Amino acid sequence: MSSTANQFATMRLAAIARHAVLIVTGLMVLVPFFWMLILSAKSPQEMFTAGISLLPRDLSVIDNYRRALTATPLARYMLNGVIVCGSILVLQIAIAAPCAYALAKLRFFGRDLIFSLVLVALILPHQVLFLPLFILAAKLNILDTYAALILPYAVSPFGIFLFRQFFRTIADDIVHAARLDGLSEIAIVWRVMLPMALPALIALSIFSIVSHWNDLFWPLIAVHSQELMPPSLGVVAFRNEEAGSDYGALMAAATIVVAPLLAAFLLAQRWFIEGLTAGAVK
């Protein structure tokens, strides 16, 4: 009995320790977001007073958000983000799904080598390719266009890897049955495999949209026209050129830019987790 009680106590202590670590880690991640919200509600005078106050004493929420929406074309930046992120996601799915199907379900010479190259591309930092991409974009005369923001990300090694791992969990009998029904390989990808890989599709969508919505480095290189700036670059321009030291309006603009991402993740988190874990079962 004492041994069982000791084991139960040990398991309970381990569970408490795990939850404590998760709570501390979660707070470390969430504190910047909470601080951003608090600053977006403070007046400039209160923001620069000595000491730290968690709750604003002089609410300037309406004024800060009004300046964030009117001082710069923030709506245009958001629209650019939707156009760029949506186009990138469509191209990534259109390319990654057939490639992943071929790597998962078809047998051909060099398949394992190609998959190894995908893994190499997966671990290769994208920033190391920005110089040749910039030179290529200049040669093609697409700098300062939507194409310069979209085309470098059309092929997603992560998308190919994620779909390939998920497709491998789908029984081969389903593919054989689709072939017997007269479907071509391309039709099998779009009408059979991709609908069954909805969790992986949602996971890729969240990763892609969050990554490119927040991307600053490549847009800073590829575009300079204000009407083409995505949200991340637009907020930087808002800070440097228009708002100056008006951090309340700046934090309000950052909150508006981040809010759609948080809402999308909260709505799709169940499929997001399922899409990331399903490929690890096999």
Image (cartoon, helix red, strand yellow):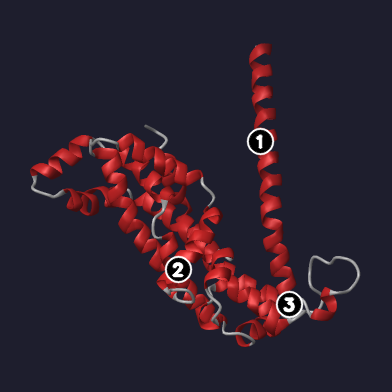
Q: Nearer the viewer, residue 246 or 150?
A: 150
Is 211 rendered above or below residue 119? below
Q: What residue is pinned by disc 2?
A: 137
Helix, strand or loop status at disc 2: helix
Residue 18 disc label: 1
Q: Quadrant of residue 73?
A: bottom right
Spatial separation of the CA atoms under disc 1 and disc 3: 37 Å
Where residue 119 appears, as percent x and y from the top left, is 44, 41
Spatial separation of the CA atoms under disc 3 and disc 2: 37 Å
Q: What residue is pinned by disc 3?
A: 248
Q: Nearer the viewer, residue 92 or 254?
A: 92
Q: Quadrant of residue 55?
A: bottom right
Count of numbered marks: 3
Helix, strand or loop status at disc 3: helix
Disc 2 marks a residue whose amino acid type is: Ala
Residue 46 disc label: none
Residue pictured at 31% horizontal, 51% vertical: 97
Disc 1 marks a residue whose amino acid type is: Arg
Q: Quadrant of the C terminus?
A: top left
Residue pictured at 51% horizontal, 47% vertical: 124
Helix, strand or loop status at disc 1: helix
Report if the CB atoms under discs 2 and 1 are less than 8 Å apart.
no
Which of the two labelled residues, at mark 3 and mark 2, occupies the earlier sequence position? 2
Q: Nearer the viewer, residue 60 or 258?
A: 258
- Disc 2 or disc 1, which is closer to the eye? 2
